[in-house]
């Protein structure tokens, strides 16, 4: 009896969770059109989900790759023969995550209200216009001629400006900062990211030095023993 | 097993070797000639030119004549079948006559008659006009001298007495050229105002084509406000640089090369190593390729001939194709009138087809002559079938015979499938035959976006006309289906409310 009920509740749970996920996906349209209101509710009213954020991030990466592969040859100069899809995705994903971490690290020190989860979610939701504009534009570019390229480039710039604006507003609302403070912390975030990259490089080079030391020590020992 | 594999490897290598030998019978490696592709990578190409003969003191028979070998020659000039070699070290000009690939000395000009000073001292350059008059840049005597074909002195072009010419400077003409009207343009050492121009009667009429001085904002502020007087005096002053060499083309425009520039200015096209000057001295060289005509786009790090190409001379053929000679790596670069690299070849060395001190290039028809000042020799290059095919194809296109040019470009492609210009040439020709889709393919291979766009526009028009029914149908469906669904839903809702109202 109890077991049956628990199955029932689990089913209901799953259904509710799916409902919530779909709701949070749909909520992105509200966020990108009403950013001030949208980002506040996204975090503080729990209207967004991390799962949806993951989805948007993955869509963003896919858009980037599809753009490189399928845009009409007239508008893109990417050397197709040299592109590595995973490298391309990694080169976007890694800076994105580092920037999230750097922002979190800096803002927690200066009374930012956002948790890492919130920052990540806001940043991912801010990427939605990129997917929303560039994916159709990739398709449309195949119907445009070289002279009509200005339409294409204008749409691309619009998507980028929109994204930057959303990142700005998103971080402002998540941390409950003033615009000036948000701007300063955007710069600080970039500096923080640079520091993180520097530390990572140092760490890895030290690690490889240490590893090679032990390897040579091992080799030397066995060489002597034999 | 291992043995077998090794054997097959050797056999394979042998087969490959025999193929290579068949391609390059004259001993050149296949990498002798190359072009750059869209991604600025080197693409090997078939030889566009091969050495026909090497002319030196021996083959000219100078030793039997007067025993003096050519020494430190500085310049070449070719007109008709006559070749003039400026034998600077011996203070004379050698006039040689061409017969097939053989050259024989016609005259050795070491003095003229009728002038106050009849001999030459360090003649750096020579020019012959269509009437056979000779002009010599007589460096040591500080003059440009003119004589008729019988070597009778006509006049001297000497240091201008004009105030615009710095009277403290010596007049040291190094290169010269003469236009159709007999105006003389002299390139002088230590003169940075451009070319010294004389009217046909010998009067000085000003300078043309000075290099502009470019100074960045940062540099200016640094120099003006932050350097002390001593520092400013020590640092180099901003003066325009001199040209390296000049050549006048058949339309009367002067091609000038410049070898003093910053490496990073090359690809942004602010260095302009090759210029085409109009009568006002403005650069009107056409540059329609992805990169400007700067010679090599990349060079091997750490090799002894490191650095950008430095063009010591340039020559322009009758079909507006210009050839520049690079002294850094001893290479020749051929560009068409649109600034597209057709071929590059040459290297440093002592074998045939390689140079140790290339100094001057000239052309006779399509044949090229390169003077080497250290080897004291002239190398005659003749175009191969491939090189000739490129010329024929671009010339027929310029004449407007598009179908014929497409055929010729196809024959170029058969020899070199890595040649973007050939794809573009074919594309342009078949675009005129209204074969848009094929033309698009060719333009894509040529990385020619503009022409692709043109072909695509026409293709799209026809596509839409052909599929207009479908397009309208899909658009209508996209509009009607959601409307219909909405209507059905509304009707359903009405039915339900109606049913409910019945129950109550």
Image (cartoon, rainbow, N blue to C red):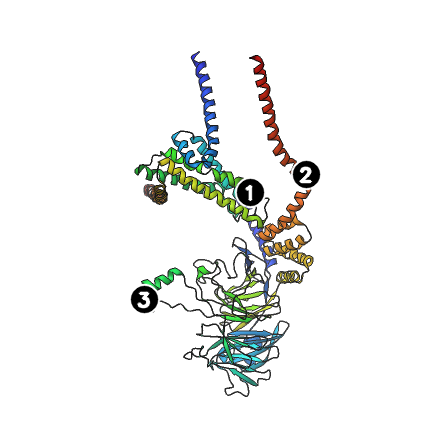
SS state under label 1: helix
Residue A70: which disc?
1
Q: Chain of mark 3?
A: B
Residue A78 place in picture, x, y as percent: 52, 48
Which image quarter: residue A106?
A: top left
Q: Mark 3 — residue? A: B231
Q: Mark 2 — residue?
A: B469
Q: Of helix, strand and loop, which one carries label 2? A: helix
Give percent across and percent down for residue B277. Answer: 53, 68
The subunit carrying tag 1 is A
As rendered, which of A8 and B223 lies closer to the eye? Answer: B223
Q: Is residue B118 left or right of residue B101?
A: left
Mark on residue A82?
A: none
Q: Are marks 2 and 3 on the same chain?
A: yes
Quarter containing the N terminus of chain A = top left
- Crowding near pointer 2: few (<14 within 10 Å), some, many (20+)? few
Marks 1 & 2 on one chain:
no
Query: Do residues under tags 1 and 2 come within 8 Å of each other at their CB atoms?
Result: no
Circle 1 residues within 10 Å: few <14, some 14–19, many ≥20: some
Measure the alpha-carbon separation of dots 1 and 3. 56 Å
**Residue at x-position 53% and y-position 48%:** A76
Q: Secondary structure at mark 3?
A: helix
């Amino acid at each position: 009896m109890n077991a049956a009920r628990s199955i029932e509740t689990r089913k209901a749970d799953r259904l509710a969770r799916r409902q919530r996920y779909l709701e949070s996906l749909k909520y992105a349209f509200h966020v990108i059109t009403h950013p001030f209101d949208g980002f506040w509710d996204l975090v503080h009213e729990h209207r967004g989900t991390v799962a949806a954020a993951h989805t948007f991030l993955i869509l963003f990466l896919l858009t980037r790759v599809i753009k490189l592969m399928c845009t009409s040859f007239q508008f893109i100069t990417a050397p197709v023969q040299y592109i590595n899809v995973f490298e391309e995705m990694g080169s976007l994903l890694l800076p994105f995550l580092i920037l999230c971490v750097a922002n979190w690290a800096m803002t927690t020190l200066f009374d930012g209200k956002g948790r890492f989860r919130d920052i990540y979610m806001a940043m991912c939701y801010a990427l939605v216009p990129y997917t929303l504009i560039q994916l159709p534009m990739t398709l449309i570019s195949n119907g445009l001629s070289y002279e009509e390229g200005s339409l294409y480039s204008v749409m691309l710039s619009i998507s980028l400006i929109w994204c930057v604006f959303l990142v700005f507003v998103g971080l402002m609302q998540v941390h409950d900062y003033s615009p000036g403070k948000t701007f300063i912390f955007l710069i600080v975030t970039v500096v923080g990211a640079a520091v993180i990259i520097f530390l990572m490089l140092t760490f890895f080079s030290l690690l490889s030095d240490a590893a090679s030391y032990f390897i040579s020590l091992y080799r030397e020992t066995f060489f002597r023993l034999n | 097993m291992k043995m077998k594999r090794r054997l097959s490897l050797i056999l394979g290598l042998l087969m490959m070797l025999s193929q290579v030998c068949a391609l390059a019978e004259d001993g050149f490696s296949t990498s002798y000639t190359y072009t750059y592709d869209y991604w600025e990578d080197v693409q090997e190409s078939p030889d566009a030119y091969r050495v026909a003969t090497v002319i030196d003191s021996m083959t000219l028979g100078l030793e039997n004549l007067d025993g003096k070998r050519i020494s430190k020659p500085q310049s070449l000039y070719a007109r008709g079948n006559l070749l003039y070699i400026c034998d600077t070290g011996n203070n004379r000009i050698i006039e040689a006559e061409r017969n097939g690939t053989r050259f024989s000395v016609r005259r050795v000009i070491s003095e003229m008659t009728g002038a106050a000073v009849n001999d030459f001292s360090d003649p750096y350059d020579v020019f012959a006009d269509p009437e056979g008059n000779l002009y010599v840049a007589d460096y040591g005597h500080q003059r440009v001298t003119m004589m008729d074909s019988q070597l009778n002195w006509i006049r001297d072009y000497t240091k201008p007495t004009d105030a615009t010419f710095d009277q403290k400077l010596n007049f040291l003409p190094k290169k010269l050229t003469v236009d159709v009207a007999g105006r003389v343009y002299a390139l002088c050492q230590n003169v940075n105002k451009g070319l010294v121009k004389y009217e046909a009667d010998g009067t000085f009429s000003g300078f043309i084509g000075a290099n502009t001085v470019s100074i960045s904002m940062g540099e200016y502020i640094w120099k003006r406000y932050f350097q002390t007087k001593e520092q400013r005096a020590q640092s180099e002053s901003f003066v325009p640089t001199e040209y390296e060499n000049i050549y006048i083309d058949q339309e009367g425009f002067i091609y000038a090369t410049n070898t003093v520039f910053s490496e990073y200015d090359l690809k942004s096209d602010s260095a302009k190593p090759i210029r085409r000057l109009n009568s006002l001295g403005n650069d009107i060289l056409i540059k329609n390729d992805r990169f400007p005509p700067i010679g090599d786009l990349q060079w091997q790090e750490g090799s002894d001939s490191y650095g950008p190409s430095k063009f010591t001379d340039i020559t322009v053929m009758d079909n507006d194709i210009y050839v520049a000679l690079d002294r850094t790596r001893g290479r020749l670069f051929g560009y068409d009138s649109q600034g597209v690299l057709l071929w590059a070849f040459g290297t440093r060395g002592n074998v045939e087809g390689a140079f140790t001190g290339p100094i001057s290039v000239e052309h006779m028809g399509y044949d090229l002559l390169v003077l080497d000042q250290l080897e004291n020799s002239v190398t005659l290059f003749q175009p191969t079938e491939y090189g000739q095919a490129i010329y024929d194809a671009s010339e027929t296109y310029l004449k407007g015979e598009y179908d014929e040019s497409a055929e010729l470009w196809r024959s170029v492609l058969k020899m070199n499938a890595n040649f973007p210009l050939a794809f573009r040439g074919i594309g342009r020709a078949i675009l005129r035959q209204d074969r848009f889709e094929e033309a698009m393919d060719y333009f894509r291979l040529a990385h020619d976006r503009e022409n692709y766009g043109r072909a695509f526009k026409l293709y799209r028009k026809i596509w839409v006309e052909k599929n207009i029914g479908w397009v309208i149908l899909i658009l209508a469906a996209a509009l009607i289906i959601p409307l219909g669904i909405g209507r059905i839903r509304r009707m359903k809702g009405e039915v339900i409310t109606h049913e409910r109202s019945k129950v109550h």
